[in-house]
Image (spheres, helix red, strand yellow):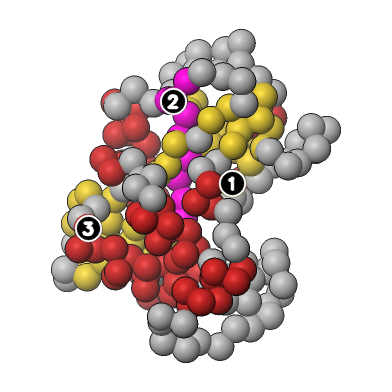
Amino acid sequence: MSLVIRKIEEDDYDEIEVLTREAFWNVYRPGCSEHLVVHNIHRDESSIKDLELVALYDNKIVGHIVYTKGNINGVENDKFISFGPISINPKFQNKQIGSKLIRISLQKAAKMGYLAVFITGNENYYKRFGFEQASNYNIHIEGVPLEDEAPFFMVKCLKDDALENISGCFVFDDCYNIDNEELEIFDKKFPEKKKEVKEGQLFN
């Protein structure tokens, strides 16, 4: 399979929203909210443009990854970032496209001088890219009790001493906070799809 991976262009935005909706529909909840997250990231210009990549197959976007900045409460540093959502066309999943987008963007992030990447997700999947529990570094996720190890909240240090003498709560960009009423309105812009409750969903 011949893939082309390049930086995002503004003309891609609408296609990426459709891709994201298809990739996440009924995965973590009936319907999904990730396409609105992507929309809000672009609307608020929160994306780190040099790290936002698309994967193309036959000139069609089949994969996408987006990065934003976050912060650790009480720490004056703008070199902590996060990625997500990462979206792969369902017909192209399990073909290493997501892995390529992650590895290439992490390499670029390191070259750009970013210190650490924080994410939430499946620890068994992301450990292959060098991610580990953020609680190992005394970094916790806002809203989760400190005694909860929260294995789904992970970090990859891009420099060996990235988190030396640092502790606190990591705060993701506001674009990840979704209002359900806003989501219902936004989703009407897309072709109707059936929302289904499925085993393994995190939210119902």
> The residue under label 1 is which amino acid type?
Thr
Place residue 15 in its image quadrant.
bottom left
Q: Secondary structure at mark 2?
A: loop
Assess disc 2: are there few (<14), some (14-19) or many (≥20) residues with their C-alpha within 10 Å of its C-alpha. few
In the image, taking residue 99 as reference, residue 76 lies left or right, namely right
Place residue 75 in its image quadrant.
top right
Assess disc 3: are there few (<14), some (14-19) or many (≥20) residues with their C-alpha within 10 Å of its C-alpha. few
Q: Which-is-in-front pick, marks 1 and 3? A: 3
Where does the magenta region start and end?
A: 77-85
- Point out the tag, 1 or 3, that comes first from the N-terminus: 3
Residue in the image at 46% along x and 55% along y? 85
According to the image, label 1 marks what residue? Answer: 120
According to the image, label 2 marks what residue? Answer: 78
* Vertical placement of residue 79 versus 43, above or below: above
Q: Horizontal and vertical percent for residue 165? A: 61, 11
Whether residue 5 is in magenta: the answer is no
Whether residue 83 is in magenta: the answer is yes
What secondary structure do most residues of the magenta stretch adopt?
A: strand
